[in-house]
Image (tube, rainbow, N blue to C red):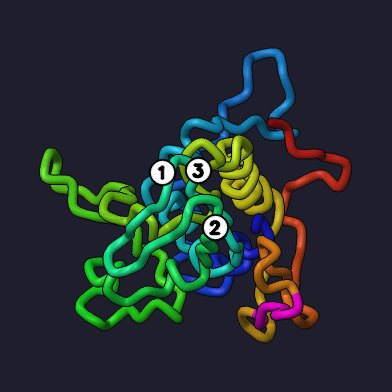
Amino acid sequence: MAFWNLIEVYNDPALLRRVQAELSNAIAPPDGNEEKLPYRFDINAITSSPLLQSVYAEVLRMRVSLFHNRSPTQGDYSLGPYKFKKGGLVCVSTNIASNHTYAWRDRIDGGRRPLDQFWAERFLIPNPKDNTMKFSTDGLDGAWIPYGGGALMCPGRHLAKQEMMSGVAIFDAYFEMKLLKGVPRMDEQFFGLGAQPPGEPVPVRIRRKIGISPNAAPGT
């Protein structure tokens, strides 16, 4: 998922510029007695960015396909017109949930941003307190479930978020990259098994940023 996060950002030059503006405050200034490199990063500045969080959430919506299995344990269970017997199997597909038009009706910009297309701002909503946009998953219970839900929700989700978002920050601090053929298709052989890998090679043009020492390694 860190790969997809990086690819989606670098596929859109306008989005990349906005992300870079957000990341400009994420590199911690060096102390008086330390070298400028390797960089140190402020993880809170990265993970609190509304835009970066929205990109992260949209990547998970599009690139994760899982089957969440549940079973009624206290008795028969009714959900709308459906009835599930105690001990029966209930299988919930994240792919169906994340592409359900009605569930996402307030997140498609009046139909201009269909769910089969990446939209970096899908998880941004107006913040009336200061007239800005804030990251939110409100109203998406059962629709955005890349980590599962309830007591069985993935316990590593917070670390995964930090890895995905910090990966973009660290990469951008040291490198420039251009995708030569755009975003690759997903490998459908891995459908239902979690984060789907790319289904084809991804040619890029990459170079180290001017002034970055070849021996410098990212600090965290």
| Residue projecting furthest to the bottom | 181
Tell me the quarter of the picture where residue 99 sits.
bottom left
Of badges 3 and 1, nearer the viewer stands 3
Q: Position of residue 21 (x, y in %)?
A: 44, 51
Identity of the residue drawn at 45% across and 66% down:
15
Left of 174 or right of it: where is 41? left
Q: Position of residue 213 (x, y in %)?
A: 82, 44
Say if residue 18 shows up in the picture: no
Closer to the chain start, of discs 1 and 2, is 1
Q: Amino acid at mark 3?
A: Thr
Left of 52 or right of it: where is 178? right
Q: Is residue 20 magenta?
A: no
Closer to the chain start, of discs 3 and 1, is 1
Say if residue 191 shows up in the picture: yes
Q: Which residues are magenta?
A: 184-189
- Residue 12 higher or lower than 40, as above or below: below
What residue is disc 3 on? 73
Q: Amino acid at mark 2?
A: Gly
Closer to the chain start, of discs 2 and 3, is 3
Q: Position of residue 122 (x, y in %)?
A: 34, 64
Rendered image: mark on residue 49 = 1
